[in-house]
Image (cartoon, grey):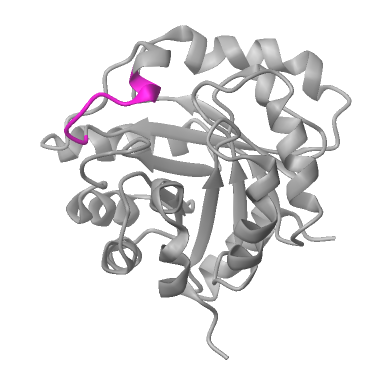
Amino acid sequence: MKTVYNNILQSVSEGKKQLAVLIDPDKIKLEGLSAFMQKLNQSVATHVFVGGSTVDDEATEALVLEIKKHTKLPIVLFPGDVTQITNEADTLLFLSLISGTNPDYLIGKHIAAVSSLRHSTLEVIPTGYLLIENGKQTSVEKVTRTKPLSRQNIQQIVDTAKAGELLGMKLIYLEAGSGALHPVPIEIIKFVSQELSVPLIVGGGIRSKKQLEDAYNSGADLVVIGTAFENTDSFFDNIKKQP
């Protein structure tokens, strides 16, 4: 049975771009999930990401269980904290916030998660997570008490991403943050992707099909979209599967 990570690698090798829809347990009502998932299943989305910076205990598992009723797409945990880990999902992005220096988010939270993961069936993917300045303070910045990397200092971003790969991260994630005023600049995506030999994920601030295509054309292997659907799910109309 192929894992989510192996499927990502295969898609990269075949030149197939991937799209994840991020669902925040604190921003969606379970009673409205069925209609949302119907549109998601009709789109080109390849993954469902679940998580948020601040989520009530038990909310993640309840949402994952409900999502599983409506889709066969892989469900990937994108946790803001240890409390968002549930064995009901398929995969966990084991995020290390390598753009910051808060030890809790570099290794501390990971140690706290081990007791939950020791006997878990979750596929765990070590992921280097870089927060990129977007024009306003994001919830990630507030919760982690870290500063984003300046979008003007491209070399620092490139070097940080490469350091994550050299440390053994299997994915690198460039994040502008939920509700970002600006997505990660295409120049940054381009230079980071040229440096890496592991798949590149890009998320935050993408609200149009053009921005999505720009991210792909610049080198993103997988793009994550959340806010575009939180504000209005009409964005699904732009990414429907071709008949």
Q: Tell me where residue 124 sits by quadrant.
A: top right
Q: Residue at x 49, y 24 (%)?
A: 53
Relative to 10, 21 lies left or right? left
Q: Where in the figure is residue 71, as x and y percent of width and height?
A: 74, 60
As drawn, which residue projects farthest toward the right?
Answer: 119
Q: Quadrant of the C terminus?
A: bottom right
Q: Where in the figure is residue 120, as x and y percent of width and height?
A: 85, 30
Q: Quadrant of the N terminus?
A: bottom right
Residue range of the region highlighted in magenta in the rendering: 134-141
Relative to 81, 104 lies left or right? left
Q: Residue at x 21, y 41 (%)?
A: 181
Determine whether 139 is above or below 88 in the image. above
Q: Residue at x 50, y 61 (%)?
A: 19
Relative to 96, 190 lies left or right? left
Q: Where in the figure is residue 50, as x and y percent of width and height?
A: 61, 40
Determine whether 63 is above or below 19 in the image. above
